[in-house]
Image (cartoon, rainbow, N blue to C red):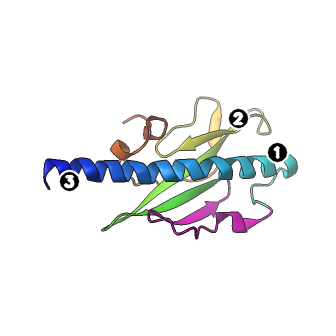
């Protein structure tokens, strides 16, 4: 792969991750709001995770209690980028911290769902890269 092609590929993959990040903002708000109102992680309308807007990159969004994962289709592979809720160990009804990709829960917090992220760190925004 030539240098120009490699740079373009990196640009495209970062754009795909950015699209997932942008869509995640709305989903995090909906899931968090439902949890604060009811104490339950399952959203009232699971249809919010149906993704059929014709996106070239995002193929689906899978929901798991306390998190969701975007499936991102690259030409040859299917990558995943997870978003997970983290709750305080001492007060689970306090602030929800959302983790993206390889991000780790801070001390005193625990995650609710599993991380299925397999998208290489170099394509992720800084907040999703975690520590290597």
In the figure, is residue 108 to the left or right of 114?
right
Residue 85, quarter of picture: top right
Looking at the picture, how far across and down is residue 106, in whole percent?
58, 31
Q: Name the front one of labels 1 and 2.
A: 1
Q: Would you identify the image quadrant in which residue 68 lies?
A: bottom right
- Where does the image place residue 90, in percent across and percent down from the top left? 75, 32
Q: Residue 95 colored magenta?
A: no
Look at the picture and state if 18 lies above or below 80.
Answer: above
Mark carried by residue 48: none
Identify the element where label 3 is drawn: helix
Report which residue position mark 2 lands on.
88
Determine which of the numbered discs, if any, sits on residue 36 in the image: 1
Mark 1 vs mark 3: in front? 3
Q: Magenta residues?
A: 44-66
Secondary element type, mark 2:
strand
Q: In this view, does 59 lie above or below 12?
A: below
How far is disc 1 from disc 2 in space, using C-alphas?
14 Å
Q: Nearer the viewer, residue 82 or 28?
A: 28
Residue 113, x across and y down, in percent: 61, 53
Residue 110 visible at all: yes
Residue density around tag 2, few if under 14, some if 14–19, many if 20 or more, within 10 Å: some
The residue that mark 3 highlights is 5
């Amino acid at each position: 792969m030539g240098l120009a092609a490699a740079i373009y590929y990196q640009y495209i993959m970062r754009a795909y991750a950015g699209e997932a990040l942008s869509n995640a903002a709305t989903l995090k708000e909906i899931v968090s709001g439902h949890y604060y109102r009811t104490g339950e992680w399952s959203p009232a309308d699971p249809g919010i995770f149906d993704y059929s807007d014709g996106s070239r990159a995002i193929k689906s969004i899978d929901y798991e209690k306390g998190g969701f994962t975007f499936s991102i289709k690259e030409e040859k592979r299917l990558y995943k980028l997870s978003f997970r809720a983290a709750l305080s160990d001492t007060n689970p009804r306090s602030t929800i911290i959302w983790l993206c990709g390889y991000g780790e829960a801070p001390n005193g917090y625990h995650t609710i769902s599993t991380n299925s992220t397999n998208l290489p760190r170099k394509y992720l925004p800084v907040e999703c890269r975690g520590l290597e």
